[in-house]
């Protein structure tokens, strides 16, 4: 797996040109929809971009693996999900230009971002074939997720139990199917 298909300067130039156009287009759409879709602050735009990427784009990609049950009956539009991610990145760049740089004191967003960061690092290490660092980052992600649970007042054992119950209701073997 090569990360260097194009020289860095070429990749940056392509991204810069794309982002200039994306920001201009996003500003135009936001101007037309501001009455029903107000512009979030930068931190929330970044969180929305993370949500689109982690929650929607990766989910759509995983649906391409037929050996897994991932709401396969649900229609998914990978291109649209990628577009939504670009939209949120562009929105963050718009607000970043007008908002002063300040320390965000949104503990919930911070903790959620740390979980996401560690899961991302685990995936990168796995793709690079490094099992040890994958495991370390998964453990770190768990620690951050437990901190998020504590902050939100969520019982992690109950959350996991409910997730398992939902899975079993949806896909579990019953006495009639044994």
Image: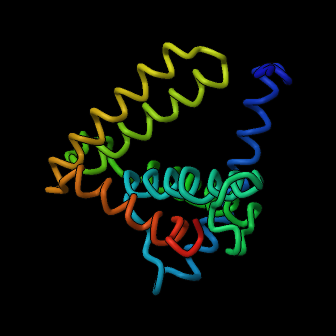
x then y, percent, for residue 65: 75, 51
Q: Is residue 1 above or below residue 109?
A: above
Q: Residue at x 36, y 51 (%)?
A: 99
Residue 124 falls in image quadrant = top right
Q: Is residue 103 visible?
A: yes
Which picture quadrant has residue 165?
A: bottom left
Of all residues, the one furthest to the bottom in this rendering is: 35
Which residue does the image show at 82% across and 19% down from the upper left?
7
User: Can you say which quadrant of the picture contains the N terminus?
Assistant: top right
Please state the horizontal and vertical placement of residue 164, each as a whole percent of the image. Answer: 39, 58
Relative to 115, 75 lies left or right? right
Q: Nearer the viewer, residue 35 or 57?
A: 57
> Foreground: 171 or 22?
171
Q: Name the residue located 74 percent from the left edge and 68 percent from the top edge.
A: 77
Q: Nearer the viewer, residue 56 or 155?
A: 155
Q: Say whether residue 164 is left or right of residue 107.
A: right
96 left or right of 157 in image: right
Q: In what quadrant of the picture does the C terminus appear? A: bottom right
Q: Position of residue 114 (x, y in %)?
A: 35, 36
Please determine whether, in this image, residue 18 is positioned above or below residue 28.
above
């Amino acid at each position: 797996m090569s990360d260097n298909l194009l020289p860095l300067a070429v990749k940056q130039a392509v991204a810069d040109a794309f982002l200039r156009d994306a920001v201009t287009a996003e500003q135009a759409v936001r101007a037309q929809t501001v009455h029903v879709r107000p512009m979030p602050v930068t931190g929330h735009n970044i969180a929305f971009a993370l949500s689109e990427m982690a929650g929607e784009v990766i989910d759509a990609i995983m649906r391409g693996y037929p050996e897994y049950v991932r709401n396969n009956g649900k229609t998914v539009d990978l291109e649209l999900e990628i577009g939504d991610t670009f939209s949120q990145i562009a929105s963050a760049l718009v607000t970043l230009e007008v908002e002063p740089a300040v320390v965000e004191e949104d503990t919930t967003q911070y903790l959620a971002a740390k979980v996401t960061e560690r899961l991302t690092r685990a995936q990168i290490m796995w793709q690079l074939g490094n099992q040890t660092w994958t495991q370390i980052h998964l453990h770190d992600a768990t620690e951050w997720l437990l901190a998020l649970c504590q902050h939100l007042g969520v019982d992690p054992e109950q959350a996991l139990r409910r997730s398992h119950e939902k899975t079993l209701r949806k896909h579990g073997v019953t006495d009639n199917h044994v």
